[in-house]
Image (cartoon, grey):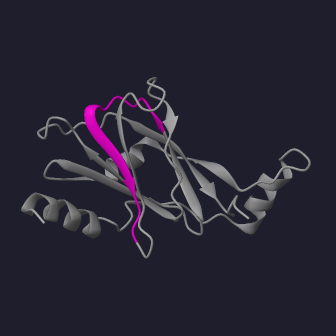
Amino acid sequence: MTAGLLTVVLTLAADLKPHVVLKELTAAEIETVKAKARPGATVTGTHRSIDSKMLTRGRWNRSVWTWTIRSPKAVGLRLHFVDFHAGKGEVRIRTAGAKPESYGPYTGDGYNQDGDFWSDTVFADTVTVEYRPADPRSRSIPFKVKEVSHMFQSPLP
């Protein structure tokens, strides 16, 4: 393993303590979401708004910015990126634990090339966003996270 890769892996492992922890959804809140669904629909989750100021809790470690969010008791999470303009920089989402997951890189203006897209789903209650700018001296974050999709039950049988 090279020293650079070792630094990134250690940084990620140390940074998994969430920068943002959302309030746990109550049983009543979940029932309200389910009650609003069309008859016969299987509801597996809800969208939770993210205040843009929450991204300021992320941190830089050399040329990598990380931001970790936890939505307690979620069985899965997706992030809604807006104003996404990473250019040649790379954004990845990762989880830790017994079954770590990693998705991305998300580059340019995202999947639809319009700056507005949802990430892949991670099956965990905590996800880390990792951003590596094309210019390692850059300290600006070229996206916002508008909301998180909190899955309170698996859509899989």
Q: Quadrant of residue 18?
A: bottom left
Q: Residue at x 50, y 34 (%)?
A: 117
Could you tell me residue 79's position as x and y percent?
Answer: 50, 46
Decide whether the magenta segment is chiefly helix, strand or loop: strand
Corner quadrant of residue 9: bottom left
- The single residue placed furthest to the top in the displayed view is 114
Does residue 151 lie above or below 88 as drawn? Answer: below
Q: Is residue 14 left or right of residue 109?
A: left
Quadrant housing the N terminus: bottom left
Q: Is residue 104 left or right of residue 131?
A: right
Decide: is 94 above or below 108: below
Q: Position of residue 53 (x, y in %)?
A: 40, 44
Q: Say left or right for 43 vs 81.
A: right
Q: Residue 110: within the magenta?
A: no
Task: Name, please, the residue furthest toward the bottom.
Answer: 98
Q: Nearer the viewer, residue 64 or 52?
A: 64
What x and y, as percent, mark residue 78?
Answer: 53, 50
Is-magenta flag for residue 86? yes
Q: Position of residue 68 (x, y in %)?
A: 38, 58
Which residue is outermost to the right? Answer: 39
What residue range appears in magenta? 81-96
Which quadrant of the rendered structure holds the C terminus? bottom right
Of 153 and 57, the residue lying toward us: 153
How many marks are shown on the rendered structure? 0
Residue in the picture at 13% in, 41% down: 136
Frontmost residue, 4 versus 146: 4
